Image (cartoon, coloured by chain):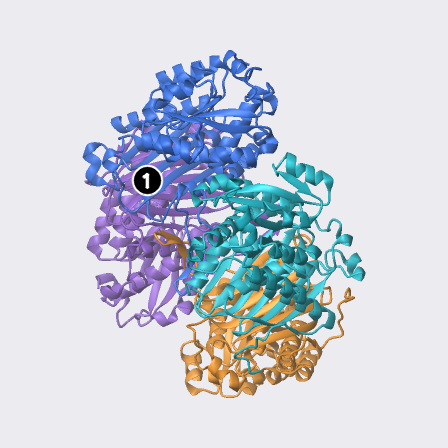
Chain colours: A orange, B cyan, C blue, D purple
Amino acid sequence: MSTATQTVGGPAAPRHDRRRIGVGVIGFGWLGQAHSRSLMRIPTLFADRGFDAELVVCGDTAPERREQAIGSFGFARAAADGRAVVEDPAVDVVFIAAPNMLHVELVEAAAAAVKHVFCEKPAGLGLAELDAALAVVESAGVHFQVGFNRRYAADFQAAKKDLAAGTVGTPQLLRSLTRDPGTGSIPHAARVPAWTVFLETLIHDFDTLNWFNEGAEPVEVYAIADALVEPGLRDQGFLDTAVVTIRYSNGAIAVAEANFSALYGYDIRGEVFGSKGMVQAGRATETAARRYTAEGVSADTPRLNVELFRQAYTDELVDFAEAVRARRDARSDDAAPASAAYSLTPGAADARRALGMALACIESVKRGTPVAVNTEAVIETAVL
Amino acid sequence: MSTATQTVGGPAAPRHDRRRIGVGVIGFGWLGQAHSRSLMRIPTLFADRGFDAELVVCGDTAPERREQAIGSFGFARAAADGRAVVEDPAVDVVFIAAPNMLHVELVEAAAAAVKHVFCEKPAGLGLAELDAALAVVESAGVHFQVGFNRRYAADFQAAKKDLAAGTVGTPQLLRSLTRDPGTGSIPHAARVPAWTVFLETLIHDFDTLNWFNEGAEPVEVYAIADALVEPGLRDQGFLDTAVVTIRYSNGAIAVAEANFSALYGYDIRGEVFGSKGMVQAGRATETAARRYTAEGVSADTPRLNVELFRQAYTDELVDFAEAVRARRDARSDDAAPASAAYSLTPGAADARRALGMALACIESVKRGTPVAVNTEAVIETAVL
Amino acid sequence: MSTATQTVGGPAAPRHDRRRIGVGVIGFGWLGQAHSRSLMRIPTLFADRGFDAELVVCGDTAPERREQAIGSFGFARAAADGRAVVEDPAVDVVFIAAPNMLHVELVEAAAAAVKHVFCEKPAGLGLAELDAALAVVESAGVHFQVGFNRRYAADFQAAKKDLAAGTVGTPQLLRSLTRDPGTGSIPHAARVPAWTVFLETLIHDFDTLNWFNEGAEPVEVYAIADALVEPGLRDQGFLDTAVVTIRYSNGAIAVAEANFSALYGYDIRGEVFGSKGMVQAGRATETAARRYTAEGVSADTPRLNVELFRQAYTDELVDFAEAVRARRDARSDDAAPASAAYSLTPGAADARRALGMALACIESVKRGTPVAVNTEAVIETAVL
Amino acid sequence: MSTATQTVGGPAAPRHDRRRIGVGVIGFGWLGQAHSRSLMRIPTLFADRGFDAELVVCGDTAPERREQAIGSFGFARAAADGRAVVEDPAVDVVFIAAPNMLHVELVEAAAAAVKHVFCEKPAGLGLAELDAALAVVESAGVHFQVGFNRRYAADFQAAKKDLAAGTVGTPQLLRSLTRDPGTGSIPHAARVPAWTVFLETLIHDFDTLNWFNEGAEPVEVYAIADALVEPGLRDQGFLDTAVVTIRYSNGAIAVAEANFSALYGYDIRGEVFGSKGMVQAGRATETAARRYTAEGVSADTPRLNVELFRQAYTDELVDFAEAVRARRDARSDDAAPASAAYSLTPGAADARRALGMALACIESVKRGTPVAVNTEAVIETAVL
């Protein structure tokens, strides 16, 4: 397919048969580790799908994490620099879980080295540089996927399936929300970058809304944000609560909402109302258990992100792996059997669209007015 | 208490003892009729509360409705003009369910005649005229109540009770929505006044949000509205779908949402998220029955407004009647036993606050920008 | 229709036109009072259905209750003896809410006087005497209804409607349960008759199961009962907890279950599983409100019988009144419009069938073995 | 610990260090394969817990399954005879998923070879032979666990946790049910052994009830069973529907219920009602997604056993592995950290207790009367 993979997969390297995928991971924080752990499960869980993942090299600036990668996870080697991961000849795919500011240059470097890329969101912090990187992805012909894991949650997939089947009709009102679990204060809030609520949190909701309202483009956003959990940090520009309204080219109006400290645990929900009905996704309780006492009826609520989305975090990697395999086999038509009935894999256009919305939100907060999203789209039906 | 009631209640009219309340109803459409029907239940249902309602006079311009009022409902007499109702000496309380444009002048006339007033929303269509009418109410010392019946729905009351008990802490994010049942098109849409979605529908949601966020004032609104159900009527200014974001003086951010045609029936919900937790109100299913078939699990959804809020429509009248009795007994301290733990009765300030928000929304749609609500309030904590 | 009503409704008594129904109530405890209160609502609530109820005479042995009936409820007169109620010429219908041991003789007396009868359950305490009374009902041609109010609960009706529509297919497994609210001990338990759990409580569940499994006959029961709430009263024969398994002639197996002290409030549920699916009825929460806190999600549970079944207690009287009107109009074909799609009104056969099961349960507990229900029915398909 | 393991773990076999567990699997049907697949995940998923599983030998009579075990699952070798698995010196633990009739002799053989045993239910088909096998387990000092996987389902664990915390108080009424998904007929029903509904299906419910009512012993059962799904097979003794009532030594009354063909999918539920409240377990819907259409609200229901209990099937193996490790480390006190707050692992006594109930049920069906469970237990409080 490409020079690099031809070399790697050549007769001199029988280890790299079609079943083997050499994995490089950049950034070995909790997410890099979680992905590595999931990847270790793929060879056995999905052996019948025809490939095995091999943890080749882990890149992280912290020596203790590099040791952990080798000692506990079984990486063959480790490097302090992400570039070394990208350029490792035994690496076929690169997982980018480094700090946000490094994402876009690593995407570009990996694509330039003709490696398939899985990048955590946001894929970049500016549209121009992201466009440049994605152009390299395009020309290299590699698979690119961004870590919008929420698409893979079983209930969000069920909602999407209904949307694709026309159950809801034409979307008119949408809602997506993210409330992170907390205790009423935010640890290390002073060190959280100012626009995190848009660039890291609501970007998930933007993608969910875009995916649910597929075929339409976001046209305009109006964003309100404040420091309601940590009002003492407002002067430093820290924002922990935000509400965004979005107008789409098909006339649909969406609301995205985020807060960093829900005492009752994780609260991730989506809702689409349309001309024929409504679908909702979002898990309200941890398990099906219910208790009835003199105080009434009660149930436990989800607390851990990794628990809430355990299945989603795994399934996004399975989808990635299958897409990579399909590229290898040059049979792109069977790329994603799971998504036959509806689109699933979040790619370059999705990463760019959601980033554009987050950036427009930042501008909207600064100006205090609605702001156009950086697209050519207009609300087709708008007269007012 | 006042000249009028002293006369009516004097020795020459023993019929008007403390237990009797003479009722006048203006406007005998479905809501005027529904209230009349509920009032007929009050004497027997709540006889132990110490009063009886008597249907004295019904005002409506339609002769057949006047006949129905006497023949089927037992009104003593009927009149074509609302003024005749207001000035009838046997009338102690006036229910205003006439067309919206007449509300404010009837409120003022009834108060001037020293009659207690129950007025459907909106109490007026302009702030200046409403202020003038409410000033007469104030000086006459009569009880004034506006028909925000949603406060009386059992689940909204339960949520309010929790809010008053501090379960949620300080409100940070609120949501209220109204989706009317429909079939995908809106009957007589061409004759619906242009701003109905704000003045008649969302005004309920504004009051719910204000009530849930009690103690804070709405500061600014940003409204988006469109004709998504009936796009063909957009040119005529008809709006059937709207989303409003509201900033409150305590920093809380609220979203109100409305649509005129939900195929799955009535959908009325409220949600308050705060520093300690969240409460939700809104009934998802018609009954507790569930059916499980090869297609999955399903349940019926609420379809009729009058069914969904049957209890609320009755309870708002009971509350009104008790307030009137308390005024008569000059024992204002026991006015509303049901609301001991939290505020309940929607009065003059509530009617004005919600109207101010609806008018600001209209302005916001016209301008395409956020608009300040006509109050002195500012967001106390806002720095951005 | 009959001599008695011809006389009462004759030209000499214009007060008794077709719209008027003279009501006699025997037994003015909480249920007799509740029914009287509901009846007072019927004339206004359902005036368009063509009749008014008039509270003629109340029978109770307690003088203070008789005073209350006249003073607070508006009965024209009161009597210490139920016979006086039955024989009052102005009485068209008799409500029997007296102590259980008196039911059957009052049913017979009322029917002999050609009065329509609404009797609380159990209609009698022995099959022979109930059969005798029901024979008089039959020959008098009066309407007889037994107070199985659960049939009228909205969710049980919805389930029944699904069953009638074939949603569940052929019933195979059924469940009905009654758990009364309590505090862990039972007030006045020592004075509660020994077999109350079967004759007063589970008889509701038996009727629900029979109604849900319409067309089949109960063939055999096996009952277990114990004093688990009040073990100190076991020696006196008091039973507060029971589980009954029932085999029906169509092979279906049912379980009925009761307990007198559920700390979490009222718990009334029904479930039918069949060849095509399942339906469930039973309200788990008091309102649609939900609260989310650091402890999880919670909701209030139903506490008051009268609240839980407010609508059912009213609707069973509406159904009764309509049946009476239909008999008067001799148009039996429009007797019960609400039940067009499925059977609704619990009559003589239903009262007898449920009593037979309760009596068989008592026998089963005494013997410690399964006992045949006193019918000709056999399990049609049983081979084992 | 024992001669066998001393040899295997000796200096000459460094491969068998403390971290390695040699696994033998007998019976490679879907459950044997599912366990093998789960075991392959354990080394990576739970590497930090200190051990790795190694698939040593698979026993199955079918050559194609033996090939699959080696080719697709990575077993080192395969054998046609279960004895060869048990006696393989590299095997430390034996998983028995062979046909039921072979379970008890394999348990005994494995224990005699001083191997830890995980046996699918039922552990045996007769009490005497099971007792004999369990005596060998006891004297060999090996860990024995029976495949009551339902204990490990998250919602059942949550319910158990509440029970252990005293939330429910003293159990009075219990319910457990199993409805297998189906299409209205049962594939290969004619080949299903006659008493399967008790020995394979309801044995799960019996264990759940015993676990929920921990500390009490089942005293008496009354069982009803019939062929309602496949009535044509009734003459051959096939039973697809059963209801069992159980009396426990603490007075609690339980109901277990099973059916082989629920068109709406898997339905596994548990409920415990007691002096202080109630807990329920059982998942009603497949995901948190809900759809609202003109027909009402609906959701998907669980269909696949392996999906419904995916987590439970894995967790029971983790628990088993930890118990084995604890035995190796001779630190039995930290055997099951997950179950610190409540008992979890189903062992020899649990296997025997549930089998005793199933056998008593068979006797009850044959006799048509209640039958005592083969224990010394009596209902302590029973007087009746």
The part of the image, by quadrant, that contains residue D125 is: top left
Seen at 60% across and 42% down, the residue is: B56
Q: Judge whether residue B104 can be spotted in this image.
A: yes
Name the side, left or right, on which D228 lies relative to A318.
left
Mark 1 residue crowding within 10 angstroms, few (<14) / some (14–19) / many (20+): many
Give the total number of marks visible in the rendering: 1
- Identify the residue at the far front of this view: B12
Instruction: Pick whichever, D136 or C316, lies toward us.
Output: C316
Quadrant for the C terminus of chain A in the image: bottom right
Task: Locate residue A174, reporting x and y percent.
Answer: 63, 62
Kind of residue indicated by mark 1: Asn
Instruction: Pick whichever, A327 or B243, lies toward us.
Output: B243
Instruction: Pick whichever, A127 or A345, lies toward us.
Output: A127
Task: Locate residue C101, reporting x and y percent.
Answer: 32, 24
**In this rendering, is residue D345 above or below A372?**
above
Task: Locate residue D106, reporting x and y percent.
Answer: 31, 49
Quadrant for the N terminus of chain A in the image: bottom right
Q: Judge whether residue D194 can be spotted in this image.
A: no
Chain of the residue under label 1: C
Name the side, left or right, on which A104 lies relative to A186.
right
Quick one: SS at disc 1? strand
Mark 1 lies on residue: C259
